[in-house]
Image (spheres, rainbow, N blue to C red):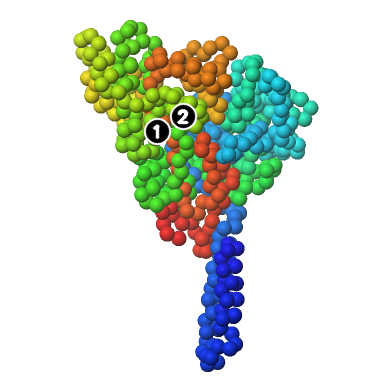
Amino acid sequence: MRKGRSVAIWTTAKWRGDRSGGSGAPARLRSVSGLLWAAVVVVLCVAAAKAIGAARPQYGGVLRVELRATSATLQPAKWKSGSAEFASNQRLAELVFDRLVTLDNYGRFQPGLATEWSHDGATKKWQFALRQGVKFSDGAVLTPGDVVTALQPLLPRGMQITATTGGVSVQCPGATNDLLELLASGPYFVYKDNGNGLLRGTGPFVLDSVSASARDADKVNGDAGPAPAQKLRFRVNELCWSGRPYLNGVEVTLGVAPARALLDLQLGKTDLGELSVDTIRRAEQSNVKCWASAPLTLYALKFPGEAKTANEQVLREAINLAVDRGAMARVLLQKQAEPSGAFLPQWLSGYAFLFDAESHVERAKELRAKLPGNAMGVATVMRISVDANNELSRLVAERIAVNARAAGLTLQTVKASGAKNDGDAQLMAWRCTTLSPRASLENLAATLKWQIPEGGVPEEPDARYAWEKRMMDEKNLLPIVAVPDFAALAGQVRNWAPSPWGEWRLADVWLEQSEAGTKTPAGAKP
């Protein structure tokens, strides 16, 4: 903005130097020219002023958000690790609660409710100093005891958190260099339960109401667990220690399909919508402002257990070699995903590139030739169960069947009936929910009921890679592709700065109002 204003001043000075005095032009002409230049200067100054005003953050307005999840709960202990609902719950919790520490997009840890932290030489004991004067939304002062009560049920087994003078101490069973990554992500929010099921936080907003489709706010707030809800309304927390957010509130509508969310954006009915692989491409073609996170959700082929025979092991290896992950990511998923040969994405583990994600059809054919004529996938169809509510799972499973057919194997997709798995294998989706790669692998192992080694998954990268490779070689889970989270937002949404790992940070957003006080639909020209 300053640049625009300086250009106007420079133009005026240049005109005065070149045009005033000593020119042989008639006085009337010089007078008309002066009026024209004065008008130009006025227009430029007005335009610069408008530009400065448009860039200045504005207070007020309610941000309208649409999410795919059909239910939500703010109770972190109720969140299911690895699920898509975990991400929705976490984004809602970010509005109400705070963490001890946060992480910026440059990978630097920042103070949250804790202003300082330290650890001993063995990184077994950590000390956190709490921020003074912080209050919950009901006016109660945050105490070390509140932090202990909130975090102890969430911490991994073996970790103990205790109150100290002015802070808390965390005792770990072994060296824990990734404790900050753990506390800066996932469910590790600090909150207070007043005993009536309503959870209070220190964050920028307060849950104000839940739509009539949910029986009461407890179903979202507390121990009663998740319940269907259409709309959640959040208002400003006037006692927030980090200051008042720009928005007056946030209104969240649940259970909105991505196609409908995109349409609502284009019609100006919402400001921020959660999209999918197929709708994000349409949004980009419509000039809607879009966002994609780093790859977070792993789609993988899961077998019910360890291979009981040598033939089962050969079959799994043949399928693994036949799958063309690269083509699946490029063509089927329209370059909106990454091929994956590892359990964790490269950005999180640092070594995913060491796992082979290439297709080797000829080698798969050789393994197929070793199978007897009565083997599954040869004489009988191998069934892949897919979630009936996840269209992407169906598409990926069908592509796996097509690739397997090229190697001489017969696979077929079937829809799962409820929680029952009707197939010989299952196409599962599992989302990273923590910034600690060690904790991510432990969450995955717990979800799949794998045996976790005594002392947990190794934290040191080389040892962790060795453990992951050992589990990969068992072929109980075949990684296929990793898919980001997607969202689109309206043109009036400003200061949208989500993290690559999926945090939306809506407390920093502000809404730009047009001169008429109306909002501009996404993709429309202002």
Q: CA distance from mark 2 to mark 1?
A: 9 Å
Please identify the quarter of the rendering in which residue 277 is found.
Answer: top left
Judged from the image, the secondary structure of the residue bearing numbered disc 2 is loop
Mark 1 Cα shell of 10 Å, populated few (<14), some (14-19), many (≥20): many
Q: Amino acid at mark 2?
A: Pro
Query: Given contact means CB atoms under 8 Å apart, are the residues at marks 2 and 1 in contact?
Result: yes
> At 54% from the left edge and 79% from the top edge, which residue is drawn?
37
> At 45% from the left edge and 26% from the top edge, which residue is drawn?
352
Apparent side of residue 198 relative to residue 142 in the rendered image (left or right) = left
Judged from the image, the secondary structure of the residue bearing numbered disc 1 is strand
Count all numbered tags in the image, as a single digit.
2
Residue 258 visible in the snapshot: yes
Q: Position of residue 50 (x, y in %)?
A: 56, 65
Please identify the quarter of the rendering in which residue 421 is found.
Answer: top left
Mark 2 Cα shell of 10 Å, populated few (<14), some (14-19), many (≥20): many
Q: Position of residue 436 (x, y in %)?
A: 56, 26
For label 2, the residue is: 345
Residue 348 position (above or below residue 67): above
Apparent side of residue 111 relative to residue 41 in the rendered image (left or right) = right
> At 44% from the left edge and 49% from the top edge, which residue is drawn?
289
Q: Residue furthest top?
A: 309
Residue 260 position (above or below residue 38): above
Q: Position of residue 316 (x, y in %)?
A: 33, 16
For label 1, the residue is: 338
Q: Quadrant of the N terminus?
A: bottom right
The disc, 2 or 1, on the residue closer to the chain's N-terminal end is 1
Numbered label attached to residue 152: none
